Amino acid sequence: DIQMTQSPSSLSASVGDRVTVTCRASQTISRYLNWYQQKSGKAPKLLIHATSTLQSGVPSRFSGSGSGTDFTLTISSLQPEDFATYYCQQSYSTPYTFGQGTRLEIK
Amino acid sequence: QVQLQESGPGLVKPSETLSLTCTVSGGSVSSGSYFWSWIRQPPGKGLDWIGYIDYSGSTNYSPSLKSRVTISIDMSKNQFSLKLSSVTAADTAMYYCARRSFLTGSYTACDIWGQGTMVTVSS
């Protein structure tokens, strides 16, 4: 199985801050990396697929980058609605493993 | 638009079989473009991929659950289902069904999710 490791596990930030979440794969996954946002008590929502392609309706303050084993999710200017938990997932090979999540909290 | 809805018992006894169904509306499980998936999330923990089935009935399961999992599809009812046998307390989780789609070329992701259903394993 491909192991996905996110850092940090939790992060405190303020509205307007620029935030970066990192995801590392235990082996190369090319650009087969997705990012999901999960708000408390809700199902995950797909934000980004194929490392950097935003889903329709996702604000442009979200961006993704990387390739191979190292990937990042960046939120350029945090908004109140962005406080949630973020998960990366590799879609390179089954089982399609997730990172452990990064909880983004209000400072 | 396409919507998914999980259903099934919220309480299962240890050693018994967990059975859940996902009903698809606004779309068809017989479409060849999708993989109908199950993902679970233990309370306070992260997401755990269980497996998927496609329109042909081809399945792919997590190795850690493979000996206990069966995913099936019922095109007449536009549903797909999950069975997990010999459950223990470690199987207590929110269970989500989701649609995995080809979004850009060969890149896939779960673009539509059900709201989830909580299953507790307890006597």
Image: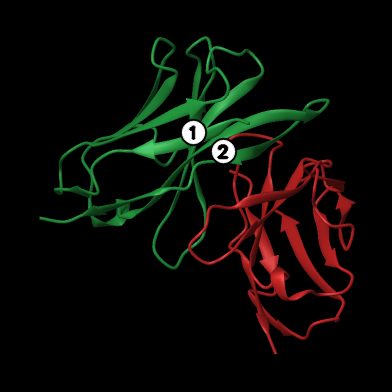
Chain colours: A red, B green
Image coordinates of residue A56 in percent, x first then y, are 81, 43
Residue at 85% from the left image edge and 65% from the top image edge: A74
Q: Which is more toward the observer, B42 or A70?
A: B42
The outermost residue toward the bottom is A107
Tell whether B69 sits left or right of A54.
left
Measuring 55% from the left and 17% from the top, which residue is drawn there? B28
Residue B18 appears left or right of B115: left
Task: Kindly give the residue lying farthest to the left in the view shown.
Answer: B123
Which residue matches tag 2?
Answer: A95
Element assignment for label 1 = strand
List x then y, in percent, for residue B18: 25, 39
**Dot 2 alpha-carbon crowd within 10 angstroms: few under 14, some 14 to 19, many 20 or more:** many
For mark 2, give the secondary structure: loop
Image quarter where the C terminus of chain B lies is: bottom left
Mark 1, residue position: B51
Of the 4 image quadrants, the one containing the N terminus of chain B is top right
The subunit carrying tag 1 is B
- Going by the numbered disc 2, the residue's amino acid type is Pro
Image position of B34 (left or right of A62): left
Kindly identify which chain the residue marked by label 2 belongs to. Answer: A
A82 in relation to A13, above or below: above
**Mark toward the viewer: 1 or 2:** 1
**Mark 1–mark 2 distance (CA, rounded to whole Å):** 8 Å
Amino acid tagged 1:
Gly
Residue B82 falls in image quadrant? top left
**Would you say the residues marked 1 and 2 are in contact, meaning their CB atoms lie under 8 Å apart?**
yes
Residue A57 horizontal/vertical position (percent) = 80, 48
In this view, the residue in front, A62 or B70, is A62
